[in-house]
Image (tube, grey):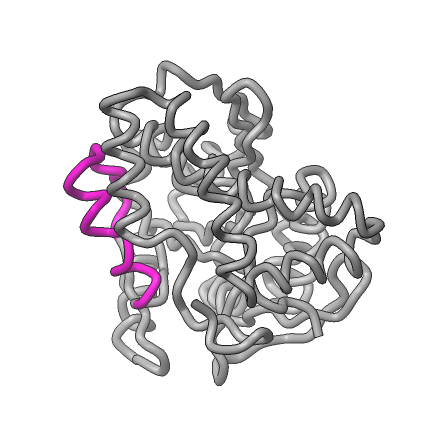
């Protein structure tokens, strides 16, 4: 649903109908049936989502440097991986978390940061399945505020609220250029709570910085890193990555706090962190538009 190949529109793939359909399918036939049907859905998406397909093809050929045959195979794998994370998020949110296994990297350090009493900026990305970890944050989740663009936020919120357990965290919807969201972010950090961003997307017209990512120049939003630097709160980079056997690995990467005082240094640290995760899980990069310059 991107309005051109090189710009994100503020909406993500996987609308309310898709979420609702997979909820029904899982409840009647189980998770395995949802995965099996997904294999057919992917065949539909490849030709009928041409902009997204072109973006994934570019990613496989020009960024990962795959040959044509491997790129074609990984194109299918890419869409299938996205569908799996949607199914998993719904399943976990619907009380089926016992059917999954979860592992954590640097979790104790992450909790110490949250317990520091200073607030925090948590920066994720459109890789893996960020929402699958929401249930593990416990009481901390009630102090988390996820900043999302309004179009992306409204697309799936209602369906998730009806069918899934409360994920705990609150949402700060952002309308392009709106001052209200900035004031809400300040209020949250003044209360020593946590503001969560997705650090790999921006809408046209918002501040962005060109950096080298995966060997090619791309633009990243300046906002999350400017917030951490301005309010002098610690930052943490968080990813929830899917592995084989219905296993999720939650990665908490905490940069040196001295970097957090400089928004550019913090952005650079985030980009290097994200690049390491993407190289480790290349088919879980879910930006379906022309991300690189």
**Residue drawn at the location 77% of the way across and 58% of the way down:** 63
Tell me: residue 8, above or below residue 119: below
Which residue is found at the position 44% from the left and 50% from the top?
Answer: 120
Which stretch is magenta?
151-170
Question: Is residue 13 shown left or right of residue 68?
Answer: left
Query: What x and y, as percent, mark residue 47?
Result: 55, 58
Q: Is residue 189 above or below residue 223?
A: above
The secondary structure that most of the magenta stretch takes on is helix
Report if residue 133 is visible in the image: no
Asked if residue 206 lies left or right of residue 263, the reply is left
Comparing 31 with 8, the one in front is 31
Q: From the viewer's perspective, tell me whether residue 260 is left or right of residue 48.
A: right
In reply to whether residue 208 is colored magenta, the answer given is no
Between 172 and 92, the one nearer to me in the picture: 92
41 or 10, which lies in front?
41
The quadrant the N terminus occupies is bottom left
Q: Quadrant of the C terminus?
A: bottom right
Image spot of residue 135 (x, y percent):
33, 30
How many marks are shown on the rendered structure?
Answer: 0
Q: Is residue 11 above or below residue 192?
A: below
Residue 184 in the image: state x and y as whole percent. 27, 66
**Residue at image coords 57%, 35%:** 251
Residue 153 within the magenta-colored segment of the rendering: yes
Q: Where is residue 68 drawn, in percent x and y?
A: 81, 52
Give the residue at the far top of this rendering. 98
Q: Nearer the viewer, residue 210 or 184?
A: 210
Residue 109 visible (yes or no) = yes
- What residue appears at the point 79 percent right and 61 percent down from the top-left corner? 62
């Amino acid at each position: 649903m991107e309005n051109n190949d090189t710009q994100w529109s503020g909406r993500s793939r996987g609308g309310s109908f898709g979420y609702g359909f997979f909820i029904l399918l899982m409840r009647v036939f189980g998770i395995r049936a949802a995965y099996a049907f997904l294999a057919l859905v992917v065949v539909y998406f490849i030709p009928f989502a041409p902009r997204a397909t072109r973006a994934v093809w570019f990613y496989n050929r020009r960024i990962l440097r795959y040959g044509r045959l491997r790129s074609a195979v990984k194109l299918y794998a890419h869409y299938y991986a996205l569908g799996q994370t949607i199914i998993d998020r719904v399943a976990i949110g619907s009380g089926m978390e016992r059917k999954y296994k979860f592992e954590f990297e640097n979790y104790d350090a992450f909790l110490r940061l949250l317990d520091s009493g200073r607030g925090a900026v948590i920066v994720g990305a459109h890789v893996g399945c960020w929402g699958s970890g929401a249930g593990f944050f416990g009481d901390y989740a009630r102090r988390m505020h996820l900043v999302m663009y309004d179009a992306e936020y409204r697309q799936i919120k209602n369906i998730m609220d009806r069918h899934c357990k409360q994920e705990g965290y609150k949402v700060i919807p952002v309308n392009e250029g709106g001052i209200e969201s900035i004031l809400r972010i300040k209020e949250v950090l003044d209360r020593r709570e946590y503001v969560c961003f997705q650090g790999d997307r921006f809408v046209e017209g918002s501040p962005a910085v060109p950096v080298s990512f995966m060997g090619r120049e791309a633009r990243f939003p300046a906002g999350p890193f400017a917030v951490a630097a301005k309010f002098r709160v610690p930052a943490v980079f968080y990813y929830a990555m899917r592995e084989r056997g219905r296993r999720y690995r939650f990665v908490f990467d905490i940069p040196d706090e001295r970097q957090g005082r400089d928004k550019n240094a913090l952005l650079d640290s985030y980009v290097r962190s994200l690049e390491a995760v993407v190289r480790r899980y290349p088919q879980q990069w879910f930006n379906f538009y022309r991300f690189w310059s």
